[in-house]
Structures are given as C-alpha cells and as structure tokens.
Amino acid sequence: MADRMNRARLSRFWRIQIAGWLAYGLISALGALPYRNAYPILLYFIGTTVAAFSASLVMLALCRRLAARRTPWPNTFALIVVCSYGLGIVCSIAGAALEARYGHIGATSQHWRSIALVGFANAFSPTIMLVAWSALYLGASHWREMQQRERELLLAESLARDSELKALRYQITPHFLFNTLNGISTLVGEGEAQSARRMIALLADFLRSTLLPTRQGDVTIAEELAQVQRYIEIEQVRLGHRLVVTMHCDREVQDTCVPHLLLQPLIENAIRHGIAPRAEGGRLSLAIIRDGDWVRISVHNSACELHERSTVSGGLGLTNTAARLAARYRDNYRFSASGDASHGWLVEIEIPHHAKADMPA
C-alpha cells in the first residue's frame, strides 16, 4: 500500500512538473511573437525553459534537504532566493547561448561576453519562477505533512476511543453474568430445575451473541433490541408474570448505530433494582423514537424505591452508560436518570441519528 501511494505521488509530481514548465515555456514563447525577427528570441526562451526545468530539480533536492533539517523559514527563504538567483543566471545564460549559437548571430568572443551580460541582466524571470516553484513545492509538502499528521492524530484518537469503549463494554458482561448465575442458583435452590435449565440455555444464547466481535463496537438499534429481548426472556423465566414489558421502536430509527450493549445495563438496572425486589413486580417500558435529527431512548420502570437508592449513588449500570456515551459521542448527546411523578424511574438518552451506511469505515 505504501509503495503504491509513493508511486502515485511520484507520478503526480512528474505530471505537474512537466505540465507546469511546458506552460511556462509556451507563455514565454508567445512573448516572442510581436517581434519581427522572433526566431532568435524564441530560441532564448526555449533554452531558458529547458535549463529552468533542470534547475528545478536542483531546487527540489535543496527543498527536501531544508525540510528534512527543519530549517527555520527565514533561513529557508534566504537560501532559496540566493540559490534561485544563481540558477536563474545559469538559465538565462543557457538561453542566450542557444540564441547565439543557432540564431544566426555568430558566437565570437565579443558575443560570449554579451551572452554573459544578457545572462545577468535577464536572470530575474527564471529566478522568480524558481522561487515560486520552490514555494509551491514547500507549501504542498507542508500541507501533505499536516494532512498526514491530522490523519495520525485522528487514528490515534479513534483507537483510544475504541479501546475505552471496549474496556467499558467488557465491564458489563461479567457483571451481568454474575447476576444471572445468582438467579440460576436461586432457581436451583428453590427446586425449579426446569426453569434453571431454560435460563442456562437462554444465557448461553445471550452470551454467544454478546461476545461476538462487532465493527467498531457499534450495532444497529434493531440488533441491540434483539439482545435486549434475549435478556428479558432470561429474566421472565425467573420473574414470570411479575415482569410486564412493553417495547416500541420507530421503524425509521432501527438502522441507527449505537454502542453494543448500550441498553442492556439500563434494562438490567430497571429489573434487578426496581421490579425484582417487589412482591407484586412491576412494569418496564422501552421506547425509541425519532425526534428530528435525534433519536430519543426512554427506559422506564414503575418501581422506584430500591432502584433509586441503588442508582443515585452511581451504580455500575448508569456510570458505565454515561461513560460510554461520553466516549462515543463526546458532547453531542444528552443523558438523564431520575425518579418521575408516577413514582417510577426514568432514564432518557438522546443521540444523533446516524444510519449504519453513514458511519465511517
């Protein structure tokens, strides 16, 4: 990949190099047309252009050396001007020599002195071109270096964010597994062998899908809801009719990407700390709707007392969710958790609507 990019960059350099100096030569040649005897002047411009093309390769080596040494800009500018002027004299002398040799003037010793004087007198134009060429090259190199540095910073930031998200995600599974195994142990202790076996089967299915690697830790809301449904089935084996669940998701947000296992700890908190401790159980509702460019996620359970004492102090579920949202969306999200007027507990999340096809690769 790197070799291919270098070859492409080299090919692009030579195309621009040849096209640029050809354009300079053609524009210079047009300047000879108003003269009655344009042929000698045309030879001068051809010689100057060819020499300037060669001189630009010398400037290329100089610019690369200055860039490699991180030479300060004032020193770089001074060296480029001095070298460009010296090479400009050489280019102008080359053009004057070509004009004298093939322009029917006759190259006598007097004319060679005239050639040298012409070279010094007309060095301004090729000097300006070489300075401009060097400035363009250094500017392009600096821009390319800044782009590369920005890509590296973005990559480093992305890797750090992904590492943080994975670390937070890996907090969830052991916590959930510990709670579920406790539930299975309770069922076994109560003699509910059949329910325990079903719960083990559901747990195996849940963990199989949970531990599968996901691209950048993101899944669609539809996939996340399937995970939530598997978890709810596990809890319904244990709680039975005491757990009543309602779920709603707008069709247009089902392809929105969210961090994997974003909802599971919220649902687990609502059931474990709000509904399960109550003899009469409770109702859990999950609603996901689109509100303009935002997706609003609401998790509500009808029992608040035990849940509130558990989560206000910063339990793992809410703390982990808040940290994952901050790592994933930076400041572009909203998150709240509090008791409501119906003596229940409400968690609300608002995130940008990004379809899976719109996510960066």
Image (cartoon, helix red, strand yellow):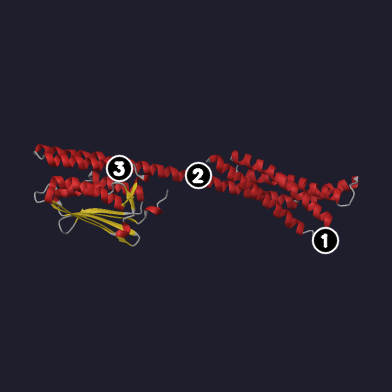
Q: Residue at x 85, y 59 (%)?
A: 37
Q: Which residue is mark 2?
A: 149
Q: Is residue 113 visible?
A: yes
Amino acid type indicated by mark 1: Tyr
Separation (CA) of disc 3 from disc 2: 30 Å
Separation (CA) of disc 3 from disc 1: 79 Å
Lower sequence index among marks 3 and 2? 2
Q: Is residue 179 visible?
A: no
Foreground mark, 3 or 2, reads 3
Tag of residue 109: none
Q: Please state the horizontal and vertical placement of residue 229, each as a whole percent of the image.
A: 23, 49
Could you tell me which secondary element the residue under label 2 belongs to?
A: helix
Could you tell me which secondary element the residue under label 3 belongs to?
A: helix
Using the rendered view, name the quadrant where residue 174 is placed. top left
Q: Please state the horizontal and vertical placement of residue 266, each as a whole percent of the image.
A: 23, 49
Asked if the residue at tag 1 contacts the one at tag 3, i.e. Cβ–Cβ closer than 8 Å, the answer is no
Q: Residue at x 20, y 38 (%)?
A: 178
Using the rendered view, name the quadrant where residue 27 is placed. bottom right
Task: Out of 257 and 315, give the one closest to the viewer.
Answer: 257
Q: Please state the horizontal and vertical placement of residue 195, each as a whole percent of the image.
A: 13, 42
Asked if the residue at tag 2 contacts the one at tag 3, i.e. Cβ–Cβ closer than 8 Å, the answer is no
Amino acid type indicated by mark 3: Arg
Amino acid type indicated by mark 2: Arg
Using the rendered view, name the quadrant where residue 207 is placed. top left
Task: Out of 80 and 306, give the one closest to the viewer.
Answer: 306
Q: Which residue is mark 1?
A: 35
Q: Is residue 129 left or right of residue 139?
A: right
Could you tell me which secondary element the residue under label 1 belongs to?
A: loop
- Crowding near pointer 1: few (<14 within 10 Å), some, many (20+)? few
Tag of residue 169: 3
Q: Residue at x 19, y 49 (%)?
A: 270
